Image (cartoon, helix red, strand yellow):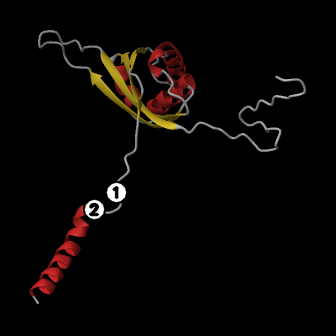
Amino acid sequence: TAAGATTTTATAGATTSAGTANTSVAAKKTYTTSATVTVSCTDADKIVTGTKGKDAFKKSFETSMKVTVKKTNLAKTGCRRLTKNNRRLSTGEVKADFTYESATNVAVNTKKTDFQSELKKELKAVNLPDAVTVKEITAPKEQTTSVTPAVSAALGAPATLFSVAILSAAISW
């Protein structure tokens, strides 16, 4: 800087030299993602039945990803008989769909290990089977809201018809 000049740097939440507050806060956006967790079929039943499993998944996702979960859905997949001769069930999975808010696009698909550790801890805390392996977490998708027009084109049709009728009557008069 030139001799005698001063430089003021403001950070988020700080007050500038003029006394005005710098309040630049990033707006939260809504994202969706899914996690697939490998588990035995009997354990999958226990996890998806009731609200304990859903709450454990939600809390684990929030803690490990540092986001705010707005909606969680759990579904059991797999768990079918392999063949009529082999009465053994295939490996089951629990698919968790999350809708969450975050100020930044968190790369949740790269945090499988963090989510798995937290999930095991939360499932154990609510007395549910914790022998789970996070198979994959899909990349987050930002949810956009579309603006619906306030007036439909169909609402203007009767008025247009009336105007054309009046105009036709005036011309033929």
- Amino acid type for the residue under numbered disc 1: Pro
**Nearest the camera: 163 or 27?**
163
- The picture places residue 71, in percent across and down from the top left corner, at 44, 38
Quarter holding the N terminus? top right
- Separation of residues labelled 2 and 1 (CA atoms): 7 Å
Q: Of all residues shown, which one is farthest toward the left? A: 172
Number of numbered discs present?
2
What residue appears at the point 12 percent right and 85 percent down from the top-left corner? 169
Question: Image check: 103 left or right of 52?
Answer: right
Question: Could you tell me which residue is drawn at 38 percent across and 50 percent down?
Answer: 147
Question: Mark 1 — residue?
Answer: 149
Q: Is residue 14 above or below residue 163?
A: above
Residues packed near mark 1 inside 10 Å, few (<14), some (14 to 19) or many (20 plus): few
Residue where numbered disc 2 is placed: 152
For residue 137, the mark is: none
Q: Position of residue 40 (x, y in %)?
A: 34, 16
Q: Say which amino acid is labelled 2.
A: Ser
Percent coordinates x, y for residue 27 in the rendering: 56, 39
The C terminus lies in quadrant: bottom left
Horizontal arrangement in the rendering, residue 12 relative to residue 84 (left or right):
right
Residue at (46%, 24%) from the top-left corner? 128
SS of the residue under disc 1:
loop
Outermost residue, top direction? 86
Residue situated furthest right in the rendering: 4
In the rendered image, which quarter is residue 161 located in? bottom left
Left or right of residue 22: residue 37: left
Taking depth in this image into account, of 11 and 136 the one nearest to the observer is 11
Asked if the residues shown at circle 2 and circle 1 are in contact, with their CB atoms under 8 angstroms apart, the answer is yes
